[in-house]
Image (cartoon, rainbow, N blue to C red):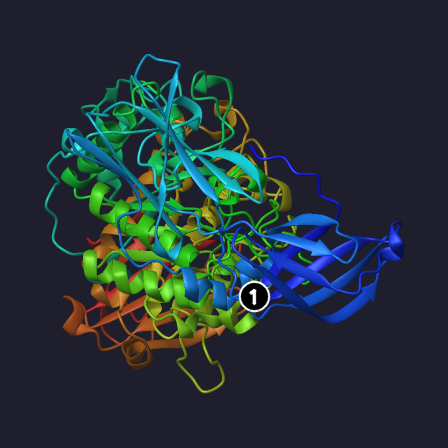
Amino acid sequence: MIFIKREFDAYLDEMDKITILLPSGNYNGESAFFTLTNQESTYPLEIIDRKTLQNTVKYICKTNTPISIGSKYMIIDEHDRKTDLQIGAVIRTEAFDEAFFYEKDDLGAKYQKGETTFTLWAPTASAVKIKLVAPKSKEGIFYSLIPEEKGIWRITVQGDLEGFLYTYLVCVNLVWREAVDPYAISSNINSEAAVIVDKERVNIPKVSMLPFMDATDAIIYELHVRDFSSHPKSGMIHKGKYAAFTEDQVEESVIGITGVSYLQSIGVTHVELLPLNDFGGVDEAEPDKDYNWGYNPLLFNVPEGSYALDANDPYSRILELKNLINTLHQKDLRVIMDVVYNHVYVREDSSFEKIVPGYYFRHDEHGMPSNGTGVGNDIASERKMVRKFILDSIKFWLQEYDVDGFRFDLMGILDVQTMNTVKEAVSIIKPGAIILGEGWELNTPLAADRKAMILNAKKMPGISFFNDMVRDSIKGSTFNLFDRGFALGNTHKTTLLKQTLAGSVQIDPNHKGLFLEPVQSINYVESHDNHTMWDKMAVCNSHEEEVTRIKRHRLATSVILLSQGVPFLHAGQEFFRTKGGEENSYRSPDSVNNLDWERKERYAESVDFVSGLISLRKAHKALRLSTAAEIKKHVRFPFEKGNMLMYHLSDVKQYGKYNHILIIFHNGTNAENVSLPLSGEWDVLVEGSTAGNSPIRKVINEIQVPPISTVVLAQY
């Protein structure tokens, strides 16, 4: 490290502007001139502004000499006081982005048997070294990287480096920091260093699947890797691990099928897994001591080690995750990966901040890190090398792990251009892969029209959004535990319910619609966040018996599975998942978070009901129309009142065996007789606790709708 006594501070804030802060205690902060020097020459600076602050005098100076970022410069004032020129806000300027954008796809460590090439983007560094540690050694070997254009540092090290640990030492503003390669693909335990792996050893064959071309055909099931198997009665041996997904079918004598076979049996098409990349909050050496959902990203391209059978083995986590995905693919189940590109665990400790301080994160008008995410930092996706990192990472997971889609956590932090670029790239690599995200409006310093939020959905065709209007109109407000939606008994939600059933697209001149097409609407009533619906009802519908709450829960889920758009189920929703009233279980123990497989058997009738609704949806394309034009043509609402809504899919013979499908949602506590809009015989497909694609009975002209229920009828 180079030590220098700074008598004042100077920052490069634009390519040609330097901010100088002189302490007011010496010479009253006065200096008539400043000069800029490097090893070759001395240049005068032009003072263009001067302000007296509380303890300093601030000077803005202009230089006519091009600054070579990464080189060492000194500033000297009138009184011969000196300081080094530090990299300041210049890194957040468009000029910096243009000057240092690097297009090639060779960042990271590229291993071959005889040599490994290391490439790092660190444009503000004045020096970069790599520290290599051989397997089972504690002694580091150091090499200096060579600077190239566009802020690139590179070195090729001879020899077989498989299994070596490596970190970078980067000097910025005369301070050395040690960082793990952001492009690392494996690490040692707890992410202390990246590990060089031979990709040929993890190049296992992929399972071939036809493209999934219509996202409205999807039924998404959200699941946490650890929750899936951690329950004592899960029947799986490798509890909390990737490997639990690859175990052969297990059948407990008391609770029946569990594991992946169960997922296959209920009929879902996509399993959305909470974060799989390396995250903080769980000690990989003792993973059972702590729990975390995984929204604390550390290394974005490294699988989480606490789910591996051996976190010390850099190959274990890679192979086991690939085997998990292959197993699901063999069962005709696709994998959506929950990704967290909106923030990092701790900004100051992140590789991004250590390697290029200040670049990867947004700052407010005062130069302070913004906090729209609520965790102390917001990723600046609009910057070119940040966008490139996100795009490179997405491509990596698609090509290396063969995932089938991405769920973007807090997508509203990211920018529209980045998300459209991601969508375009994903569609080329894997046509039919699903992109969905949380489009909440968040307080981050990005222009409102650039935020990838639900209000800008029409600027992002083909990208899907969690539809909170659907959630709140059916269940009630997530943020008001006592607010009740339609399914929980509210009689003022039928207008919103109609929008839900129509995929939240425009079907009449009075309602603009949230989305361009139904594929953009992710319809859900619960997810890992907030109270489960069962726990919410335990509070706001506590006056009702369990049998009544079961009916309300089934009513809510039936709306999700029979609406236009993309249905989304929280794991265990089909058997009334509970977390014991815990609202935010992100680090609660397994006893709170695990998937209670015993409830699956206790509420087997409900599991069959949900599975029946899924089979019905799959059997009739009219329940999952692809375009707004089709919805406008075929969706009708012939009857509504506060506690009942009739939803008519008219003239839909082209989509299946029936020409008319009639769905009645009823939240009232008394049975009601309802006249049917067309004469003739109707097949009853859903009634009471029974649902499926086979007729239960037939009716003519009218039907008695049971209390708190969904009825589906169909006519040829």
Q: For mark 1, what is the residue?
A: 446
Disc 1 residue type?
Leu
Report x, y in % for residue 593: 48, 30
- Using a 10 Å C-alpha cutoff, classify the residue at mark 1 as few (fewer than 14 neighbours), some (14 to 19) or many (20 or more): some
Q: Is residue 115 above or below residue 516?
A: above
With 459 as the anchor, is 32 left or right in this view?
right
User: Front-most of 230 and 688?
Assistant: 230
Report x, y in % for residue 516: 37, 75
With 361 as the anchor, is 612 left or right in this view?
left
User: Front-most of 583 and 390?
Assistant: 390
User: Front-most of 456 and 192?
Assistant: 192
Q: Is residue 82 above or below residue 658?
A: above
Q: Is residue 615 above or below residue 633?
A: above
User: Front-most of 637 and 458?
Assistant: 458
Report x, y in % for residue 201: 15, 28
Q: Is residue 364 visible?
A: no
Report x, y in % for residue 247: 21, 23
* Element marked by disc 1: loop
Q: Is residue 713 above or below residue 298?
A: below
